[in-house]
Image (cartoon, rainbow, N blue to C red):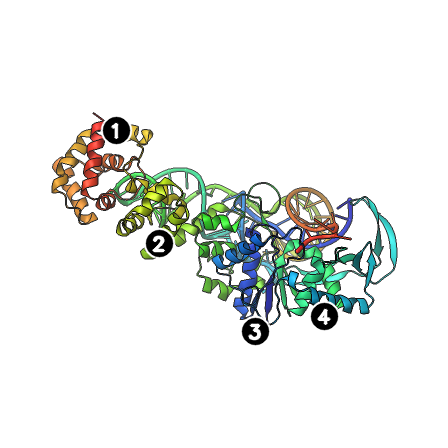
Amino acid sequence: MSSVRVRFAPSPTGFFHIGSARTALFNWLYARHTGGTFILRIEDTDKERNDEQFLNVIYNSLIWLGLNWDEGPNVGGSFGPYRQSERADVYSDYLEKLRLAGRTYEKDGAIWFKLLGDRYEVFDDHRKKTVTKVKVAPTVIEDQIRGRVERVEDEDFVIFRSDGNPVFHFVNVVDDIAMKITHVIRGEDHLSNSSKHVELFKAFEAPVPQFAHIPLILKQNGPGKMSKRDQGALIEEYQKRGYLPESLVNFLSLLGWNPGDDREKMPIAEIIRLFDLTGVNQSNARFDDKKLAHMNMAYLLELAPEKFVAIARDYFKSHAASPTTTLALAAHDQYFHDVMTLAQPKIKGLEELPIYTAYFFSDDFAIDPKVREKVMSKGDPKARLGELFEALSRLDFASDQIIEDGIKALAAEKELGFGDYQSVARLALSGTNVGPSITGMMRVLEKEKVRTRFERFLGTVG
RNA sequence: GUCCCCAUCGUCUAGCCCGGUUAGGACACUACCCUUUCACGGUAAGAACCGGGGUUCGAAUCCCCGUGGGGACGCCA
């Protein structure tokens, strides 16, 4: 095990979104790549805004994505506790160090961190008030991704609120010291906080960890970074929509990082092997749900049929409220299996499944009027369906191939093409022109059902 | 307003560090092929170096300025 220790430090103040997931992923990847330790630390110092339910959202999302933590809540570790709300003792110890070093003072009931240098007053246009500044040399941040960044940190800042609770800057640095964090990998929105943090590290006389500020994910439409409220921002949502976590992870890994060549779809082991901070970009990336959907389809396509069926069943179960999924779940296992394997190579995502397969589980399906119009307008489809109905008794439904041969024989006999039968049969059987092969459809539906649907359709067209 | 970061097809990006490419790939879009509908797949096409100055024989690549985008400026994290 290497000495690399990284942490993902979310605060449970809202749902878990894409940006957080990507930060977690990059930390996890770096830990796995280097053989280091991935730590989950919950930054819940703001009691007002924290909520237990969000904690479970974080845990569940990380687990779903496969980002297991080596130290943290529920798994323990020798640097715990890993929830900041349980680390009050640690913080008072560290506050004492700062106090002894003469780097704190009290004002308005809060405890402030004192910068070193001469003070002067200046009016701040933005905040519309006079503030006290300190004459300081710029703070240098050596960043693995940005290079050397200088920032002037010239105002004292609060480290303990008047309610007695420590603030983010303080606990973040203290815990990074206490937990021996070696690399701080976080979003670029923290870059301007880093000067505060570096000054704190220096005040504690602690080694400054390596910083790596990764680019932000921008919302796909409109200005600004992606936030919890944006469309497609929540991890939970992808879970609900039946996205495969490995496809989301693969997609996310490519947002701001690349292996240096054209490879995109890669197994996680390969991503871990290739991942490094030097491959991380400096510019923000816009989220593209189409590319994610494509990635997901590619993963779905290569799933072993048994696995696909199991995942499909889970998806139906978690959407059991709808009538279509209820009927599907009520079907025999083998039948469900057969329908799903028919659909697997055809669909782009699990979300399509209930509607795509609905007519397999219910005779009560609508005929698409547009498709009907199109199919019925050329040739004599009614006659074709009649012929096919006639031939049904002679057709063996044992395999797609036998059905295909049977229809082809019929077509040859009538000096017609396969398509002349296919389109109208599909319409009668499914009410649409979208779906799996007609032969597979007939095989799975079985002869009796095919017969009754043909009959019914023939009846409706008079 | 101040400070910080960034800048290649519509989007994600390779190339930049170490100047010489028909500036490559993927998603999306278009056409065609495959075909039993719809997809998948295949082929092809269109599509970019933000602008201006330098440096240089030569700049996407190095430097400066501008512009644009993003972030931060809380007793939030």
Residue A249: give x, y in percent of width and height. 49, 56
Kindly tell me whether residue A153 is visible in this rendering. Answer: no
| Of residues B51 and A255, the one drawn nearer to the viewer in this rendering | A255
Res A376 label: 1
| Mark 3 residue type | Ser
Circles 3 and 2 in contact, beta carbons < 8 Å: no
User: Which residue bears the numbered disc 3?
Assistant: A2
- Badge 1: how crowded within 10 Å, few (<14), some, or many (20+)? some
| Of residues B7 and A105, the one drawn nearer to the viewer in this rendering | A105
User: Distance from label 3 to label 2 (Cα)?
Assistant: 38 Å
* Residue B44 left/right relative to A55: left
| Of residues A406 and A1, the one drawn nearer to the viewer in this rendering | A1
Residue sitting at x 23%, y 27%: A460
Residue A294: give x, y in percent of width and height. 43, 49
User: Distance from label 4 to label 1 (Cα)?
Assistant: 80 Å
Numbered disc 3: what chain?
Answer: A
Circles 4 and 3 in contact, beta carbons < 8 Å: no
Residue sitting at x 82%, y 59%: A106
SS for tag 2? Answer: helix
Kindly tell me whether residue A74 is visible in this rendering. Answer: yes
Q: Earlier in the sequence, mark 2 or mark 1?
A: 2
